[in-house]
Amino acid sequence: MSSNDEAKESYLIKKTTFFIVSIIILIILILLFAGYLYVSSGLKPVNKDDTSKVKVEVPLGSSTSNIAELLEDKNLIKNANIFNVYVKVKNENDFQAGNYELSPSQTIDEIIEELQSGKLIKEALHKITIPEGKSLEQIAEIYSNNFDFTKEEFIKAASNENFIKELQNLYPNTITTEVLEEDIRHPLEGYLFASTYEFFEEEPEIKDIITDMVERTDKHVTEELSDKKVDFTVHEILTLASVIERESKFDKDRSKVSQVFINRMKSNMKLQSDITASYALGKHQILMSYDDIAVESPYNTYSVEGLPIGPIASPSIESIRAAIKPEGKEFTKEYFYARPSGETLYSSTLEEHSKIKKQYEHEWQELNKDDKKSK
């Protein structure tokens, strides 16, 4: 073999060796990068937007592996093995047994910190349920029956302008200047979300109670509006939802009742809701007289065009959804009649509506008699 051939062969060997080594290095780099992405992903929150609370019980004597598996089963971490390695690398330990409330939005470091702090779920001292459709005054009465403040003190706090402005700063997309219009009876009427609330203090502050309720309204309304286009403001949504809540007993009717009101507004018809006239009068009545529905008030939809000036009660989430997304344009009815049983009958003309009313109005009259006898 000539020296020329030897040089060529040597060159080919070196070139082949360089190519093989380069491929190996590239594969190693790809594996390292893939591993980095895998670990990096495993250390991130399961869902940074999901702030819901998940109850986790860590039994006494649980190992790090046991805890990691428990957290993965509860969908609070992405990978138990990564959690185990991370804990060992950072030399984290001293996890405390007990009951915890953790969230899929938390990072691994935040979860570790909670498990080390021994921050346990406390037993609520009070658990109070606010039913849907209650007015602010009724809500004030429920709380005053459970805590050491009066109904009047609750209403006064809920009407304090400085406090309202604090809430506007906290929830600017929900609490707007509309709540402070001159003729509004209670600024936060309709903004106190009906739900069950737990209290861990013997005597919570009124402002804290109200803030918690407004926060839930803000959360639910924000979620419901996240991917929808509507022609109403939040104040108008809550106003319409509150009337829907009081006018319909069953969830299946709420979107239809909502559409009836919208159809009437588009036809330049007054809503003529007895419920709004009753709120305007400031008293509950089963039957409304002509004098009752003639009361002059920005809440009375027999005397004002369109929606009342503000909500008349705290609506359910179903009524809020119905206000945001009514039945649809194909549902063209402009009248409805609700029987005491909750059955709601719809009609297209006043003539049809009057026939239905004549057929069933005796049910309300009998109910009214029974109500008067019981008083």
Image (cartoon, grey):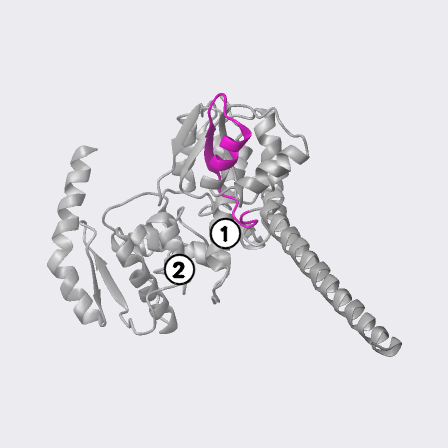
The answer to which image quadrant residue 107 occupies is top right
Q: Which residue is mark 2?
A: 323
- Badge 1 crowding class, 10 Å Cα cut-off, few under 14, some 14 to 19, many 20 or more, is few
Frontmost residue, 129 versus 90: 90
Residue plotted at (27% across, 45% down): 285
Q: Is residue 72 left or right of residue 26?
A: left
Mark 2 or mark 1, earlier in chain? 1
Residue 188 sits above or below residue 199 on the image: below
Say which element carries label 2.
helix
Frontmost residue, 259 versus 37: 37
Single out the mark in the foreground, 2 or 1. 2
Say which element carries label 1.
loop
Residue 16 spot, x, y in % from top left: 75, 69
**Residue type (three-letter) at the residue carrying disc 2:** Ala
Frontmost residue, 225 versus 249: 225
Q: Is residue 106 left or right of residue 322?
A: right
Residue 93 spot, x, y in % from top left: 62, 27
Residue 81 sits above or below residue 6 on the image: above
Q: Which residue is mark 1?
A: 183
Q: Which residues are magenta?
A: 46-70
